[in-house]
């Protein structure tokens, strides 16, 4: 896996963690305006980075696909089988 791809994937993982953590906070304080703004900002960043990654390297999971593309995803080798 090349360095740019690793960097992009790490950024997605960081944003995903921020979303998970802030959603737990929002479970306890669902009307906190600062927490809602934080969550929305990081959700937008996550969506942008994930879309860019998937456009360049392919889907991150089967939930990233529509029903017609699933068979293609399921039949392709896993990332560790591709030798990248």
Image (spheres, rainbow, N blue to C red):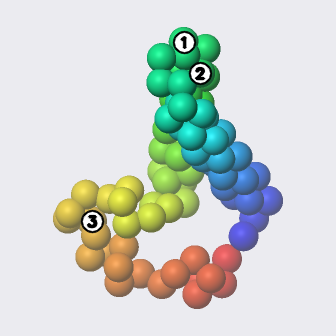
- Say above or below: 65 vs 83: above
Which label sits on residue 69?
A: 3
Going 53% across and 46% down the picture, which residue do you hit?
50
- In the displayed structure, would residue 25 be above or below residue 37? below
Task: Write the residue at 35% across / 83% down.
Answer: 75
Residue at numbered disc 2: 35
Asked if disc 2 and disc 1 are in contact, CB closer than 8 Å, the reply is yes
Height in image: 18 above or below 73?
above
Relative depth, front residue between 43 and 23: 23
The answer to whether residue 46 shows anywhere in this view is no
Q: Position of residue 67 (x, y in %)?
A: 20, 63
Relative image position of residue 2 (x, y in whole percent)? 75, 64
First in sequence: mark 2 vs mark 3: 2
Q: Residues within 10 Å of mark 1 (few under 14, many from 20)?
A: few
The quarter of the picture where the N terminus appears is bottom right
Give me the residue at 65% from left, 47% from top. Answer: 17
Residue 20 figure quarter: top right
Position of the C terminus, as image quadrant, is bottom right
Q: Residue furthest bottom?
A: 81
User: Does the image show residue 79?
Assistant: yes
The extreme left residue here reads 68
């Amino acid at each position: 896996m090349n360095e740019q791809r690793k960097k992009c994937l790490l950024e997605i993982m960081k944003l995903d963690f921020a979303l998970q953590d802030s959603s737990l906070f929002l479970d306890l304080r669902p009307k906190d305006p600062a927490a809602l703004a934080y969550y929305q900002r990081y959700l937008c960043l996550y969506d942008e980075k994930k879309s860019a990654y998937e456009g360049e390297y392919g889907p991150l999971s089967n939930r990233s696909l529509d029903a017609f593309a699933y068979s293609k995803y399921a039949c392709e080798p896993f990332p560790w089988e591709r030798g990248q």
